[in-house]
Amino acid sequence: MKILFVSALLPYPPHQGGQVRMYNLLKKLALHHDITLLSFIRVEEEKEYLKKLDFCRRVIPIWRGNAWQPQYVFKSFLGNKPFLYATYDNDQMRQTVAQEVTRDSYDLIHLEPSYVWPSLPVVNLPVVVTEHNIESSIYQGYVVRYRLPFVRPFLYWDVLKLRWWERRVWKKASHIVAVSETDADVIRNTTKAARVSVVPNGVDLSQFTFQPKKKPGKKILFVGYFGWLQNRDALGYILDVLWPKIIKSQQGMSLRVIGKKLPKNLREKITSLGGSYGEEVEDIVVEYHKADCLLAPIRIGGGTRYKILEAMATGLPVVTTTIGAQGLAVSSNKELFVADRSDDIVKAVSEALANTKLRREMTKRARAVVEKNYSWDQLAKKLERVWNNVKKTS
């Protein structure tokens, strides 16, 4: 098949969730399909990475720049688009898509994710949209916790616009791909006419090798891309609420934080608590193998969490919340520790570190779940089936 793949961000380097997903799926699918990638870029240096995506037939970068530009702010404030969608309302992308569709005989357009929709011209082709999250739910969760009450009404208005646009795209798209059954149910319940399939996020099983620790330790790890609201919120919760309780319950605990775009205030807080951080690490797998427990107290939902899947693959015990475990093919306290109250989370961390037998059993079950459900080979075949079905029915 000939696929025109339109992306909000360049899939390389695969540092954050959406990049990891697109890079691995594109690499697998390009073995059997003719894929042209149109991708937004934010800095000129990204053009150096285009050669890393040479498994695509062509890669065409489209300039977007930083989101916080006056034209995007005014477009959102004065128009009907939420800020996120306004930043992807791009004439150059519209023109390029129109040229490609006219020039070549594509079978379908794959759009990832839905907030790139404003950059699509009217085309006579089926459009498949992948949703990495339910963005309106994430933003609403952030607004609820926003510290300046007088700003909240403006943020709520943006969430309402975001919700309206999501529904609009879900109705218009030929098919929606969600990354979890939880997200798929939201889309189905919100938009009855939507056609939805689930293709989860995955793990490179050859890279994330299973090496569980045999002896108990006290190294706690948090991993996340801090450009996302839910990761900043989760780390803030660890530093402000959980860590004081953890070090009170056990001596000698250490905290390690890994992730790009870590805000200065969080870096300073980590240092003041005696922890360490790394925005760039040579090999994230080594970090998982060194740690004794992954702490992922996610409070704002949507999608599936790569850090949890990666930890499960490497044999690292995971402590997360009900929201953090949503969308994963796991049972509470069978493959990972699930707790929501701060005191219960602290107890779960203690048990994950101290109970050697339980930890060994849970990590084996966790690896088995990842092998069964989350390898990129399996997931590429699932997406391929979606493409084939859309082509047949369009």
Image: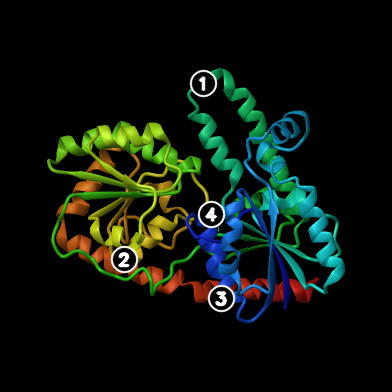
Pointer 4 or 1: first along the chain: 1
| Alpha carbon separation for disc pair 3 and 1 | 45 Å
Quadrant where the C terminus is found in the figure: bottom right
Amino acid type of disc 2?
Thr
Label 2 neighbour load within 10 Å: few <14, some 14-19, many 20+: many
Q: Which residue is mark 3?
A: 28
Quadrant where the N terminus is found in the figure: bottom right
Total numbered labels placed on residues in the image: 4
Q: Which residue is mark 4?
A: 182
Pointer 4 or 3: first along the chain: 3
Label 1 neighbour load within 10 Å: few <14, some 14-19, many 20+: few
Is there CB contact under 8 Å for labels 1 and 2? Answer: no
Q: Which mark is residue 148?
A: 1
Q: Position of residue 39 (x, y in %)?
A: 66, 58
Relative to 99, 266 lies left or right: left
Label 3 neighbour load within 10 Å: few <14, some 14-19, many 20+: some
Q: Which residue is mark 2?
A: 314
Classify mark 4: helix, strand or loop: helix
Q: Position of residue 223 (x, y in %)?
A: 37, 50
| Alpha carbon separation for disc pair 3 and 2 | 22 Å
Classify mark 2: helix, strand or loop: helix
| Alpha carbon separation for disc pair 4 and 1 | 31 Å
